[in-house]
């Protein structure tokens, strides 16, 4: 991300999540209500646990917006953690508040716990859990909601849908109920589509300019994502079946199919961008898995921290957000401009 | 890529491909023979066409290596295009050599042609083909072969295999023959494995530090890749089935399964890194697809430039190379060091 | 800045200034009292105006630190603007609060006003002033105070002094009083020194790795700085006089002079790093300069916003902070490490 | 450098210097003759030694340009080292060619030798000299000459002059003769001016977007530069004297003075960009300085490698080139565009 660059911060039970976005031109309308709607979407979805009710996230814009429009200066977004009041001591920055309350040392399989404890040399896995929690995606959704408002100005629209939960491709709620009744968790596959993108975002000229690669990074780095696909999975198609033929109609080049998912040669080709991803089942299980206690170095049952049965719907919202950020960055790189109304997509 | 950074250049029928790698510490042994072996691997594989024989790539190291070891200064790799002598006029840098020989204006579906012509405003698609050709991956393999020699010092080993060609999971050669006889092309799925990686490459603390994301970018940006997977595709697994339990054995934390593919929380967890990818069928077909001529704006048959039936094996070598570069970058970031023998992985 | 990377945000009269620092290893002791002491230093100094009393900045650490030590996750710093209560309407993010109160359209010479208004297309120069104000350096000093605490662990120490105010090289306070009595402003020259740096930070191998260049950027981009020098200004020295001879004493290579200011070939050479800079006089004058009103397009007197007579001392503190950030980044790049106690400078 | 990004490589006595530039839009006219003229300028100037005659640099463009215009793909520049034929054995990449011929171990004061030998752990200072030599600036001038041709399309013009050699502000040649007769070396001060820049390159909104900082890095990282100034050194001016008043004339905002050197708030303000720098005397002296032999760890006389008396004129050309690259990057960032004729500066 070269023009729309941002950093996020915040622990799961710390005071707040924060993001600073640097590089937005002046003059874009930013409505916090839209950001809050997106935050709500992330918290909704069948299969979410109790925390979602506690949270009810709302964003505060601390800088970069004045009288409803971006000023050109960095935009700061803050989401308070509503639960923080109960965690102030446990998450205190002060050395004198040191406590082992809420500390734990049995790694949760499928989480950052084990690798994080080795990397950052800690035996209190709370230090790893707090940042690796999916909670951090809330502020990423907020950043994405800013990006979506920028895309909106260019009439670029987003949609998404769940394709599969576990092995099931319809009636997802039944499947989630079934899994929940077993105290288990389940993942799934979803699709995000962006329409009305200009031709030529990304480039074929260098590997790190290819838009498919940038999107793959943005989506694969969402917690729990293990598979990313652009367009139709080509496995089993012959060349004569897979590629999207082109036609000239009314003086325009058009495709009648979109197996490429809108990307050829690492560039948008005018068709809808179609990105699919598979999320693994949430690793925090009520029936704990076998695991290792890194303090006592003995076999032990994995730590359980309150959790959901299925978060595919939330994950879809995060993926929409991540892709929105990549697309805004590409548009700003391609078209330049320091002021919203001067940025014209031909 | 922050420490092991590189740029590549070169047209498919230009004089040469070039790469500059900046950021390699001093004292690493670099053997051009190993690079040439990797280049050979890229050119081999069942299903390749005639160009492979012309090429027989060999690398020249133009800087950064002295008496067999890196000096700390940037390393330059050059691969001459053997076929250049026949293309000197067509690819000339001089305005006075302008010719329409070898120029074409009918987009090849599945290629960068259409989007590239719009983006870079050219009606001679030669200007797009020359850089978007898979030929550019030759020098990327050379860069990766440098990276592999660095990994080799740390005893990190790479292997790969083809999992599927079209719908077929064994006797791949028969399937390729069958497709070739039809004048068609076919893609496939492959797997790259890196073993003996230290725990804690990548990080969970920020989305753009997650190693799964970086690898996904590196692999998805290879021409023709449409799907990237880390470890086992979780679709259909319940949480209790998917996650890799941990055990303490002989004072060490171990996993007995590796569905995570060696990455948890965006970090290596000590298990082999397993990356899978699906390559689409090569889009250049002997039986040309319907397409658009962007000069005349009429329907037309796609341009045919000499091509292969199946390049999955070559693509596997490119993926190995790309991942090697990411891993070296992570190791240099994590362990620091300006001199090979001072870089110790505990 | 590749490892110690940060973004800052905040308007001069907005709710707060914020910084997110990403890339600090775990285990470093961070004391907010030290940050506050540095903030106090920035606000002190002979020649400052009334705002300094209003402000009395204090930092809040919102993430990344637990029980006194860094966790490895991003660190968030917030400094509230004490004056914000009087500016809530003027700086509101809501479109319905739109007001022209405190808006102005006559550019202040020497400020970002004119260029900023053209770039970001605004006729209310408040939109430019708010971010270009030197107020933003408060949070940069806070970031630098985090960096200094990291340097402190490696026993790297900072000092600084004013070399000149206007044309005067001693009794600076008299000179400031004299200028103040005239309703004028004055700049000056100062020096920042870092001692005990390891040999070999930075590198000669590529232009953008040279430490002198990175420091020059960090210092020249401080508001009002026009000149940066490394070590002794060589103008007028012959080669035989300027360069620092080396000697072997007690088995060590030493220099007896340090005209190079601790940098040779873009790398630290073991001697103290000496950076000098010249700050221009503060451009906001009680006796306003001639200027242009960009709304009416007429000649006009420059807008006056409360100001200081001389801010060289504050600027020195900012320069210390900026250089601290560069040095921490170099140390993390050179030595690697994810945990404070594992990072050993030989 | 985010859009116009490049890497350079090459040893002083290696086969060649190479640069790859990635990010140039298509359609810019690139004339190698102009690059060669710039290379000639770098080699000229009163006070240069014998090597300049050997070299007579010429560029070869290996990629990215076709029929006189950029293609959008990376541009490769190669400058052969004419002297290489005599150094093939000494600079060989093959381990079996190992020789101590031309190796040396006595550090040259003022050079990268000492710090480089510690950093990259070598006792053969040839490994450091070869890359830290000012020879590398040849290919940087070539890159800058590409940038200048891009600037030329926008009618942005460069000029420069020497302001001072040693203590002398005119009749520079006499001074150089005098110093040469003493076997000594001398530095000087020069000025580079770019005219016709649009308003608003760079930005005040974040420290690392400020154009003064970027230019300071670009110039300070040139070998031997110790001082960088933007515009008039403000030391000794009162605020009322220093800042450039603005006036409205013929419906335009104008300045009548340019002490700011064309930059206010880190942005271009429409006036000529004026950058000054001081180069130290060349450190390689015929009368060698006292130094340390890092192999024997004894006092010794510094190694002498053929050298010049004064290279200020060459350094001026390098500074022009470096600044050109920064300016092109800023223009591409600000105005976007993938095709030369589509990039319109209003």
Image (cartoon, coloured by chain):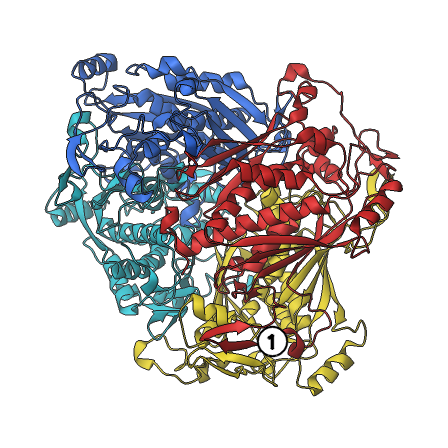
Chain colours: A blue, B cyan, C red, D yellow
Give the residue drawn at x 31%, y 67%: B30
Subunit that carries the residue with mark 1: D
Question: Is residue B50 visible to the viewer in this orientation of the structure?
Answer: no
Q: In this view, does A305 lie to the left or right of C262?
A: left
Residue B296, image x and y in percent?
A: 48, 42
Residue B89, image x and y in percent?
A: 47, 65
Residue positioned most to the bottom:
D181
Question: Is residue A141 visible to the viewer in this orientation of the structure?
Answer: yes
Residue A181, image x and y in percent?
A: 18, 13
- Seen in the picture, residue C231 relative to A173 is either above or below; the reply is below
Give the residue drawn at x 74%, y 31%: C125
Q: Is residue A13 left or right of residue C181?
A: left
Give the residue drawn at x 41%, y 67%: D120
Identify which residue, C137 or A49, lies in the foreground.
Answer: C137
Picture quadrant of residue B283: top left
Give the residue drawn at x 34%, y 34%: A127
Residue B31, image x and y in percent?
A: 29, 69
């Amino acid at each position: 991300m070269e023009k729309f660059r941002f950093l996020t911060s915040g622990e799961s039970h710390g005071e707040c999540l924060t993001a600073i976005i640097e590089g937005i031109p002046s003059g874009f309308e930013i409505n916090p209500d839209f950001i809050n709607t997106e935050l709500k979407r992330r918290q909704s979805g069948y299969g979410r646990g109790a925390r979602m009710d506690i949270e009810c996230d709302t964003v505060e814009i601390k800088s970069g917006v004045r009288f409803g429009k971006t000023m050109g200066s960095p935009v700061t977004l803050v989401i308070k953690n509503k639960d923080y009041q109960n965690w102030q001591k446990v998450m205190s920055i002060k050395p004198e508040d040191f406590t082992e309350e809420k500390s734990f040392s049995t790694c949760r399989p499928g989480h950052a716990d084990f690798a994080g404890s080795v990397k950052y040399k800690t035996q209190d896995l709370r230090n790893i859990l707090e940042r690796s929690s999916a909670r951090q995606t809330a502020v990423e959704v907020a950043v994405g909601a800013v990006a979506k408002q920028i895309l909106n100005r260019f009439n670029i629209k987003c949609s998404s849908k769940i394709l599969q939960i576990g092995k099931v491709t319809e009636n997802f709620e039944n499947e989630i109920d079934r899994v929940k009744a077993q105290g288990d968790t389940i993942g799934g596959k979803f699709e995000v589509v962006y329409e009305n993108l200009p031709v030529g975002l990304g480039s074929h000229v260098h590997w790190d300019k290819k838009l498919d690669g940038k999107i793959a990074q943005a989506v694969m780095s969402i917690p729990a994502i293990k598979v990313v696909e652009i367009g139709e999975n080509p496995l089993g198609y012959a060349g004569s079946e897979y590629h999207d033929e082109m036609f000239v109609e009314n003086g325009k080049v058009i495709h009648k199919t979109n197996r490429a998912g809108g990307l050829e040669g690492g560039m948008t080709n005018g068709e809808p961008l179609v990105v699919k991803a598979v999320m693994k089942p949430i690793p925090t299980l009520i029936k704990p898995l076998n695991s290792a206690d890194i303090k006592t170095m003995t076999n032990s049952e994995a730590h359980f921290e309150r959790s959901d049965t299925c978060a595919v719907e939330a994950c879809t919202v995060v993926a929409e957000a991540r892709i929105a950020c990549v697309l805004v960055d590409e548009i700003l790189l391609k078209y330049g401009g320091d002021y919203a109304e001067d940025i014209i997509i031909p």
